[in-house]
Amino acid sequence: MMKKIRLTTAQALVKFLNQQYISVDGVEKPFVEGVFNIFGHGNVLGIGQALEQDAGRLKVIQGKNEQGMALAAVAYAKQKLRQSIYAVTTSVGPGSANLVTAAATAMANNIPVLFLPGDTFATRQPDPVLQQIEQEHSLAITTNDALKPVSRYWDRITRPEQLMSSLIRAFEVLTNPATAGPVTIAIAQDVEGEAYDYDAAFFQKRVHYLDRKEPVQRELEGAAKLIKESKRPVILVGGGAKYSQARDVLIELSEKHNIPLVETQAGKSTVEFQFKNNLGGLGVTGNLAANKLAKKADLIIGVGTRYTDFATSSKTAFDWDNAKFLNINVSRFQAYKLDAFPVVADAKVTLEKLAPLLEGYETTYGDEIQQLKEEWNAERDRLSKVTFNRENFVPEIKDHFSQDVLNEYADVLNTELPQTTALIAINDTIDADSVIVAAAGSLPGDLQRIWNPTVENTYNLEYGYSCMGYEISGALGAKLAEPDKEVYSLVGDGSFLMLHSELVTAIQYGQKINVVLFDNSGFGCINNLQMGNGMGSYYTEFRTHDNQILNIDYAKVAEAYGAKTYRVNTIEQLKAAIEDAKKQTVSTLIEIKVLPKTMTDGYESWWNVGVAEVSESEAVQKAYNETAEMREKAKQY
């Protein structure tokens, strides 16, 4: 007779999580590192009791905001190249509702995270319980149904025995490179505490093998033919290339055949910037070298990319009349994009198998790749030396504040420091193996263009969803993944105000992170967007009711939490603060007052946004006409 173990549903869940392992290229390790939690009714007496009784090897971390701790779990899995995860448990109601943004972030980025929100009663006897939503057309609906559109797999457990098949399905999704993403398993709170005689075999060690899907011969021959027929190919390095750990073979193929590399936000730091053929970021947040080269490419080899509107400049980055596309992706859905020749396989193994088929092939670029890189390096050097002039300052942003308004910001914030100058100084001062984390606002554009990673996998930027609030939470997750490295959260004041609760968690658990806060007193990125499309500056600056610029002492906030803090207004102060922060064992916050409109602007790129077709403003009318003209040039599929 099969041996049975009597456990509650929640105890069985925890026991199962302890026994999940992953094997990648012959290396086996635990897959679930721990559990983030905020306990409330709906999970504290079930999952909470199970963890208190026997958490096993799982690390248990108390979060401060459900969205914040879930974003930390997203960043952890991202930094671990999707080979290790944290689970996240919340109460029913607002606790689970707060997971939606984080789940969407994981979904957009194809990052595995296990969400375990509590749910209402399976018996429905106490209904409506506290925080329960009542829908007249269905009593089966709860807050957790909001997680369905943003989950790769979703299930609700209303009987203890349902847990077994549900978890096996969940981990198939979590460990599958083609489907990796958020999994939600909502467990009715009465069922969490309900006992059942589980088969002992369910709790045996289970190894999930991340076997690399190999391309078939037809795919290899077709890909090789396309490459050999091209004269000016370019490899677009996406996040899938990073997760596949394709760095070495990318460098080998690029060097041997003189094929340039360009990057998406997710693909950046797959290959270090100092590699001679790496031209950096492509698209709306891309640089001059990558964008100029892409416009003349006759073959785009997309390696693990989703071709987002930013990477493709809203489908205007390429010569659609002459360029062909070759997509290498474990996802068939992604591989078919832009009517490409699809290779549905692992990036690393595909490139390795392509290598012998390309013998004797050489592009016609000659020295052009290096010339473009030198041109961009000169532009970056210029951006590192921008200085503010109170009489006649012309920022990079073409539609900008008047000189009087810029002077007002300089006076109120007591700074003359441009954002680009500060960023490059940070890049030059932190340790080479440090990990940076960022997500939204104007910083991703600057970082994609001017940040030069010199060590692999040190650029953790969430831009699949551009989630404000990821930056500090993500830094905690990255630190949990890289405990021996310095981790820097690069965050704007707008994102800091939205979500910085996990700075407290980092301090509480001795996980040192460095928050570098760029304060320009407003939502600068969106201010650029509205002014660049004919609007005025409308509700995107941080001003008081009587139109005074807000000047918040963010360092004092972090100091109250227990962080070591610095206030800097010059490059010298900034470099000194970074060097001192390296010596600290506690989390730090460096508050940098920067001038608005001093970020980088687009380099031969365009972003398709919804401009008003009818307006009383001539400037808006002009912007609409320009947008309509560009839309005609964009590819339609």
Image: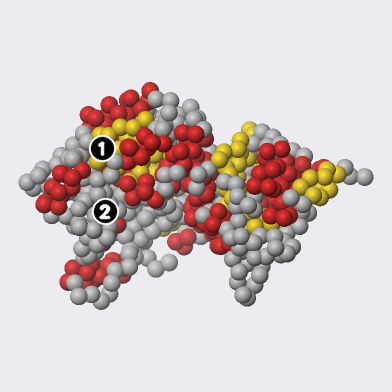
**Dot placed on the residue nearer the N-terminal end, 1 or 2:** 1
The residue wearing badge 1 is: 422
**Secondary structure category for the residue under label 1:** helix
Q: Which of the image's four quarters has the N terminus?
A: top right
Residue, x 34% and y 57% (percent of image)? 313
* Other residues around mark 1 within 10 Å, as few (<14) / some (14–19) / many (≥20): many
Q: In the orientation shown, which residue stands out farthest toward the right?
A: 1
Q: In the image, what residue occupies the spot 26% across and 37% down?
A: 422
- What mark, if any, has residue 589 been given in the picture? none
What's under tag 2, amino acid-wise? Phe
Colouring method of the image: secondary structure
Q: Position of residue 487 (x, y in %)?
A: 42, 34
Looking at the image, is 350 positioned above or below residue 606?
Answer: above
Residue 226, horizontal then vertical, whole percent? 45, 53
The residue to which callout 2 is attached is: 542
At numbered mark 2, what does the secondary structure look like: helix, strand or loop? loop
Residue placed at 46% from the left, 55% from the top? 306
Counting from the top left corner in percent of width and height, residue 231 is at 36, 50
Q: Is residue 634 visible?
A: yes
Q: Pick the residue in front: 223 or 314.
A: 314
